[in-house]
Image (cartoon, rainbow, N blue to C red):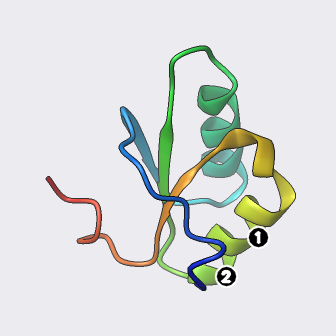
Amino acid sequence: MSHEQTHTGRANIGVVGLAVMGANLARNLASREGNTVAIYNRSPGRTRTLIEQHPEAGFVASESIHERRS
């Protein structure tokens, strides 16, 4: 993922797995006031696609499950 596509910040909820159900869940959670959603998928292409298709969601994306650990 290029730095232009990586959103930085702190999320209050995360979704791992961005197939149909996970992507819809992430979009739904992001649409609710006060939520910032971190997203991760084992295949980075799904993460990039979701970010590109829904820039309004403001997802915090990660290509590694260990990147967002706190």
- Local SS, label 1: helix
Residue at the image point whose x is 61% and y is 41% from the top: 26
Left or right of 56, for residue 62 = left
Query: Residue type at mark 1?
Result: Thr
Q: Quadrant of residue 58?
A: top right
* Distance (Cα) linking label 1 and label 2: 6 Å
Q: Quick one: which residue is furthest to the right in this view?
A: 53
Q: Residue beneath label 2, please?
A: 45
Image location of residue 45, percent across then percent down = 67, 82
Image location of residue 51, percent across then percent down = 72, 61
Image location of residue 9, percent across then percent down = 41, 49
Residue at the image point whose x is 59% and y is 49% from the top: 59
Left or right of 32, for residue 63 = left
41 lies above or below 36: below
The crowd level at tag 2 (other Cα within 10 Å; few <14, some 14-19, many 20+) is: few
Whether pointer 1 and pointer 2 mark residues with C-beta atoms closer than 8 Å, the reply is: yes
Q: Say which of 8 and 22 sits in front.
A: 8
The crowd level at tag 1 (other Cα within 10 Å; few <14, some 14-19, many 20+) is: few
Residue at the image point whose x is 35% and y is 77% from the top: 64
Q: Say which of 2 and 53 sits in front.
A: 2
Image location of residue 30, percent across then percent down = 62, 32
Q: Residue beneath label 1, please?
A: 49
Which quadrant does the N terminus fall into?
Answer: bottom right
Query: Residue type at mark 2?
Result: Gly
Left or right of 3, for residue 56 = right
